[in-house]
Amino acid sequence: MSEIRNLATNSLPLAYLLGAAFNPPLLALPLYMGKVSAGRTTGFASPAQDYEQERLDLNKRLVSNIPATFFYTVGKSDDSMIDDGILPGALMIVNRALTPKTGRTVVVVLNGEILVKRLYSRAGVVELRSMNKAMNYPNIRLNEGQELIIEGVVTHAVNSY
């Protein structure tokens, strides 16, 4: 049987990871409080919305568990997860404290390679699936004796356009 390990329960060296800071400098930016339509127009916004603002703190918005949160960057040509909203060059926010379950997008180490894939596990079958229908990448099925280290669950992806 292949072995799946979660780094949250193991003491492996993590020197190559960039973790979330406990006291990050505050970069409070204005956050427009009105709605932005991504579909059809529904009329005119209230003129008062021009003056509705609060301050945005990305740490509060994106990091829920500081000691368990790490950041990874997707390679510039890696497009296997675009249907999950993870584009090439994206910054992924990964939480090691979350339970990796079937259907979750996870960062893993398989045969020494760090990958981001959708986890599938059912009836003893463990697969890592790409989310790019256009490219139709093959699933990675774990074989007997292989070790899969799950580093964490992807909670957010910050993409540049």
Image: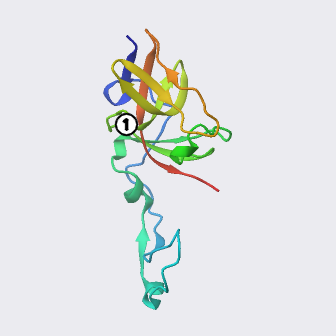
Residue located beneath label 1 in the image: 96
Quarter of the view holding residue 2: top left
Q: Residue at x 40, y 35 (%)?
A: 152
Assign the N terminus to one quadrant of the image: top left
Q: Is residue 6 visible?
A: no
Above/below status of 76 relative to 111: below
Percent position of residue 63, x then y: 39, 51
The one nearer the camera, 31 or 81, is 81
Q: How many numbered circles does the render carry?
A: 1
Above/below status of 126 relative to 63: above
The one nearer the camera, 66 or 31, is 31
Give the SS element for disc 1.
Answer: loop
Query: Which amino acid type corresponds to the residue marked 1 in the rendered image?
Result: Arg
Q: Residue at x 36, y 46 (%)?
A: 66
Q: Residue at x 53, y 73 (%)?
A: 40
Q: Residue at x 53, y 68 (%)?
A: 38
Percent position of residue 11, x then y: 36, 24
Assign the C terminus to one quadrant of the image: bottom right
The one nearer the camera, 119 or 161, is 119
